[in-house]
Amino acid sequence: MDRDLSDEDSVVDLSFEAEGPPAPPAELLEMLPSYDCLFQGGGKSIFFPPLEAPRSPPEHRCWSSFLEHSRIPVVTEEVAREALLSFVHSKCCYGRSAASNLVIRELRQQTLCRYRLETFSESRISEWTFQPFTNHFVDGPRRGTSPRLWDIKVQVPPMFQEETRKFQVPHSSLVKECHRCHGRGHCKCSGCHGACMVRCPSCSGAKRRAKQPGRCPMCSGSGRHRCSTCSGRGNKTCATCKGEKKLLHFIQLVIMWKNSLFEFVSEHQLNCPGELLAKAKGENFFKDENTVVYPLVDFPLRDISLASQRGIAQHSATLASRARVLQQRQTVELIPLTEVHYWYQGKTNVYYVYGTDHRVYVADYPERYCCGCTII
């Protein structure tokens, strides 16, 4: 059961904060109630969601009524030619004459079914992180016990839209001396190792240039030059604490909303590439959306029925132990596919019109002038 957070328990949104360097050794940090596991697995832990009670299975569906109200218009000869002309117009080196004059001899039409399952889930992990301490308010364990990760309420994004957000867990903050600079606010320069000077890049420390008289003009004959990395100071501001000398450590909640997708297109006997049909625009035939959806065991097409069972089983097995399912949506779309047999200049060939928007696939167009176009 989710609990409301008071003003003192408010969650700080870290979605737009830059990621910091790796966390320091766990022994520098203190044990916090409910988060002991963070000190046993390298500073990061995956929290499993509470179990949700499944809804009751749906009643038997009458697929005949669906079929009666889902009729796709037949592709006529005129539509097939217009689709080809539009396709040719989009190609810079395809001639229009063939598309206009070819003789269409036969139209073989078939309607395919595309099954799609979407599972929108939420997973949460916690990890120690830190940022420079700038003397601001510290929400530490003295202000109360940190809530469990699945008790923290956040605004869920729109269903089926992926997003990742980061939050600071209330009452988990600790202030410690910077482990990199040991509280000095600066570190020895890596360029000169604290010496402030480096070997002259012009004469390589020889004090004079090869084959040139006189002293090296860059180092005035000293063979040394001021370090450009630290501007001759011998140290640089600590990149970890940004010169603040202390770090604010806290437990960060990372929430990932992910949309898992399973797709299947029913088999067909025509030679149109499957990857085109998987992306084709279809007519929505059936839609079922709920917290949990059930397989279409009684669907008239056995391939779709089996795909539904397989997809739901896969998502269940993959997400059950690491995420909470918020919503599922399964759809069945009807995709028209027409094989157009035509005759042109003594030769017969075929092209395909697919999808409700009449996309075209042609493997061997008869009037093509170069090899630079990609056939889609």
Image (cartoon, rainbow, N blue to C red):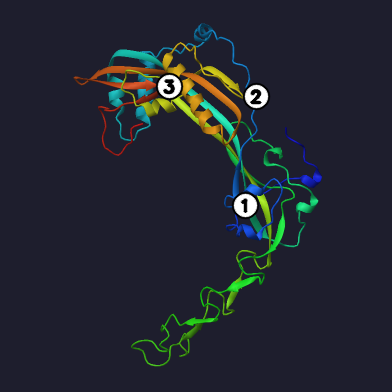
Q: Tell me the kind of residue under disc 3.
A: Gly
Task: Kindly report which numbered mark, 3 or 1, lies closer to the viewer in this rendering.
Answer: 1
CA distance separating discs 2 and 3 = 39 Å
CA distance separating discs 3 and 1 = 55 Å
> Would you say 64 lies left or right of 341 here?
right
User: Farthest bottom residue?
Assistant: 214
Which comes before the other along the chain, label 1 or label 2? Answer: 1
Which comes before the other along the chain, label 2 or label 3? Answer: 2
For the residues bearing labels 2 and 3, Cβ distance under 8 angstroms: no
In the rendered image, which quarter is residue 213 located in?
Answer: bottom left
| Residue that carries the numbered disc 2 in the rendered image | 53
Q: Position of residue 242 (x, y in %)?
A: 64, 65
For the residues bearing labels 1 and 2, Cβ distance under 8 angstroms: no
Give the secondary structure at mark 2. Answer: loop
Residue 248 makes an appearance in the image: yes
Question: Relative to residue 193, is residue 99 depicted above or below?
Answer: above
Tell me which residue sits at (57%, 19%) in the image. Answer: 288
| Residue that carries the numbered disc 1 in the rendered image | 39
Foreground pick, 242 / 250: 250
> Would you say 185 lies left or right of 113 here?
right
Tell me which residue sits at (49%, 19%) in the image. Answer: 332
Which comes before the other along the chain, label 3 or label 1? Answer: 1
Name the mark on residue 355.
3
Question: Relative to residue 342, is residue 228 depicted above or below?
Answer: below
Q: Tell me the kind of residue under disc 1.
A: Phe
